[in-house]
Amino acid sequence: MVNVNHSPSPATFWTQANALLRNNLTFQKRNKKANIRLILFPLILCILLVLLQYVIDTQLDKPKFKCGCECPKSDICDESEKVCGVEYSDETQLVTCAIPNPTEWPPLLQLSQGKWYPAVFTTLFTAQNHSFGQIVSNNMFPSNFTMDLSDIKGSLALNVLGSESLAEDNNFIEPAFTSELPIYNLQTQCPQDNIAFPAQFQIGGGNEQEDTHTFPIEIGGRALTKEIKCANGINLWRNSSSDINDEIYKGYQSDDPEGQINDIVSAFDFLNSNEDAFNVTVWYKSTFKGSNNFGPTPLLRIPRSINLISNAYLQFLRGPGTKMLFEFVKEMPKSATPIKIEIASLLGSLFFTWVVLQLFPVVLTALVYEKQQKLRIMMKMHGLGDGPYWMISYGFFLALSVIYMVCFVLFGSVLGLKFFTLNDYSIQFVFYFIYVNLQISLAFLLASFFSNVKTATVTAYISVFGTGLLAGFLFQFFIQDSSFPRGWIICMELYPGFALYRGLYEFAQYAVSGSHSGTDGMRWQDLSDSSNGMKEVLIIMSAEWIVVLFVAYYIDQVLSTGTGKSPLFFLKGFQKKHLSPFKKPGFQEQGSKVLAQMDKPDVIREREKVEQLLLEPTLNHAIVCDDLKKFYPGRDGNPGKFAVKELFLAVPRGECFGMLGPNGAGKTSFISMMIGLTEPTSGAAYVEGLDIRTHMNGIYTNMGVCPQHDLLWETLTGREHLLFYGRLKNLTGSVLTQAVEESLKSLNLFHGGVADKQAGKYSGGMKRRLSVAISLIGDPKVVYMDEPSTGLDPASRKCLWNVIKLAKQDRAIILTTHSMEEAEALCDRLGVFVNGNLQCIGNPKELKARYGGTYVLTMTTSSDREKDVENMVQQLSPNANKIYRLSGTQKFELPKEDVKIANVFQAVEIAKRNFTVFAWGLADTTLEDVFIKVAREAQASDTLS
Ligand SMILES: *[C@@H]1O[C@H](CO)[C@@H](O)[C@H](O)[C@H]1NC(C)=O
Ligand SMILES: *[C@@H]1O[C@H](CO)[C@@H](O)[C@H](O)[C@H]1NC(C)=O
Ligand SMILES: *[C@@H]1O[C@H](CO)[C@@H](O)[C@H](O)[C@H]1NC(C)=O
């Protein structure tokens, strides 16, 4: 049928690689939707980021986040007429404003907050020399408010001003002058007549009243009005600094709203100061919780208290005329700094980690699918070597990953994300390239441990999301924490997901700083920056890639079915070849069983034939099994079991050998050994002269298998399956197409578009036929068919039989079946297997003759005539044996040597005259009878021994 006259040489490495590559491409073409979805994922994410960026940009463009503006004349005006500047801005807007000439603010003391009435603020002091401390601290507060309108700033500095309002962390605007709270002047005594305060002084415009002083304080040209109230400033002596500590501690405002608060403004310890030395400790006030939880920054109000005490000391030394004036505090000028939030760079590390990790489940799932569907082993059995498999699969996933990553970077760059555009593309390429390689190796490694696609998919996705979250919300803090030991970070980066995150994080950092300062992102020379983790990450990932790839290959060789190499397979060359497995325990007791086989002359003849063949090998015999054994060691307390015992078998080319046997007889174990799924425990088998223990790869190129369960790609069509396996068998060009067509036609898979339907949509029978077609394509010399006709309708079965009959002409076929009809129709010889032993072997006729040897006479009469029938049979043959009786129907076995058929007819004719015979029949033994008999005998003798 298939490719009758062409006998191809084994496929080369490149032919196999080509076949697998084409098959993968077709498979991926079928997977179009999933692939497009995969590629779209980063695109959608990039678009999402761009949209988010747009929303944020529009928000930041609102006046709230810009320097404040106002219409100078009326309430409403055009945008162009507005004047903008720091004076119209609130604290948030101030950040963005340009301030070329910051305002000079009078320095203030930070006063305790509270409704002080009458306002009294305390400072505490202590010193080693009490009188010294007393004298100096008496110089602190002036006795009255001094004002010289010709030098406002200078004269304000002669007073001691303070505010309850909280200081900002910059001094572009002094909140004391913009808030509602009054400014107090601390003096030793407020005027008696005016002890109940209304405003005493006022800063800014307004009419000058009797006891109100106004001072033109300007911010950016805008005059402010501010009241100055009188407050008593008093100094209190304390015996020690620990007393001061104690008092301040007791008055500290706690979170408790009822919490205590005192009016202590500041405190001083003069220590060992005297005329010659000024040595002082200053306590400053910070007992406020600001509106934000970080609290205010009172540092801006400290300088005044230091100036105050220094001035007091100066006056003690040099008399009251000497003053060190502290006139104003002024920030440095600054340019406008609009707020920019580069969202892709901020969220990028987390999002992009997910994008890149996304590939991992894809690769893993594809690998596990091949394993779950046993396609890998199926391909192997049809000649696909490990080399081409690894090269093509790896290369294929690498190409997929690279395309994916290129699309990802491309999308990001086109959409203008700084994350991509600012950093050197060559660094990005190297980083992603190394990472995807590591990821693919890892998928190969982990695929060995999964056997179920669903488990693998779920596990992979959980790990993807978990890794992203852990990295984004835990690992990142470790990176940012400069005190965290670097060694530990490197340890964490050994986990590839974290290494990936670190790399992306570095890209993001460089992109953020690049876009803020308008410079480039990461360049190659930046790798040597001490804070840049990219170099370590690249080294770690490259090293891991190599190690993981090696380990993955090693584990694949050890674990994967079909190779079943020992964990030390690479040391094989050094070991002595094939230690005798007979040394294993459990073999000694077998000696007696050999004798038990002696009464099977056909089995012994087969054994002699095999021994003969081994001495003078001929090429006629495609399969020769020499004392093949398979022992399954006991597990969980169960005793070990021989699945196949002492099997000698020679199958010449052109023969179809049928294996019969009850379930669990060892047929499948035998076939598994022959197709390389398991290794024989002992003994050897030769296929086309090649030893199955050592030359399985050579055998595969000449072998076809139709496994018991169909191993097919769900999404590939029948034709594509045959094309792939045909290519693996080194068919090319028109020979290949012709072979595939013929194969499809002969198995009735050609018409009605069946050939181009996906195998997943085939009925069970169609799949079965496709499996048979696969096993026969490429003219293999040896074909194993494990129950090829199960699930077929009679017509298809007939067609299948014709195909097999034609196919067996120039090859050896080993076929297992439970259908005696099939065995009789197809097989030239049969062997009956029971409990791992070959019980008999021969062609169907011989077997029937040998084990049959009887006719079966069935006769139905009325029940009271049973005795008469028995008598009749007794006369025909004294050795007859009754095997069945039920209400008048009886069955007898008549030995063939005793009876002639003619005599039986005669006897029945006579009987019919004597009594009524409802029905009768005489049958030769069928193969089924033989099978049942052999199986029963074997089982009986087994239980006896
Ligand atoms: C304490 O300080 C006063 C004033 O400076 C000084 O006259 C006196 O000698 C000091 N006493 C001691 C013990 O140093
Ligand atoms: C400070 O010391 C003096 C004398 O040593 C003592 O009389 C006074 O009670 C002390 N004051 C405080 C607040 O402990
Ligand atoms: C200032 O006082 C502290 C504490 O008493 C002392 O340790 C330090 O030596 C003094 N410094 C000077 C310059 O006297």
Image (tube, rainbow, N blue to C red):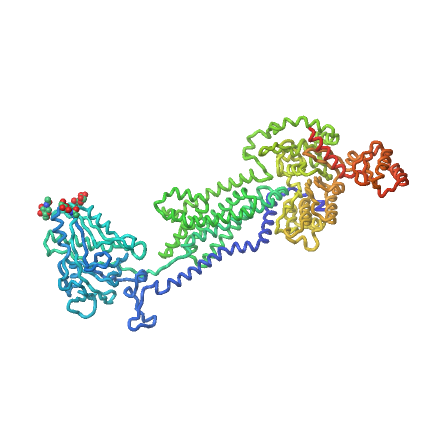
Q: Residue at x 20, y 64 (%)?
A: 227
Rendered position, 584 above or below 928: above
Instruction: From the top left corner, tell me how far across and down residue 244 is, in percent.
Output: 20, 48
Instruction: From the top left corner, tell me how far across and down residue 211 is, in percent.
Output: 15, 67
Rendered position, 461 above or below 57: above
Instruction: From the top left corner, tell me how far across and down residue 219 is, in percent.
Output: 24, 64
Number of numbered markers: 0
The image quadrant that residue 511 belongs to is bottom left
Query: Ligand 3 quadrant?
Result: top left
The image quadrant that residue 861 belongs to is top right
On-image quarter of the C terminus: top right
The extreme front residue here reads 864
Residue 276 falls left or right of residue 464: left
Q: Nearer the viewer, residue 426 or 296?
A: 296
Q: Nearer the viewer, residue 734 or 591?
A: 591
Residue 715 falls left or right of residue 48: right
Q: Residue at x 69, y 31 (%)?
A: 942
Rendered position, 403 above or below 487: below
Instruction: From the top left corner, tell me how far across and down residue 243 is, in percent.
Output: 19, 47
Q: Residue at x 19, y 65 (%)?
A: 199
Residue 911 falls left or right of residue 323: right
Asked whether residue 392 appears in the rendered view, the answer is no
Asked whether residue 381 appears in the rendered view, the answer is yes
Q: Nearer the viewer, residue 733 or 567?
A: 567
Rendered position, 504 above or below 597: below
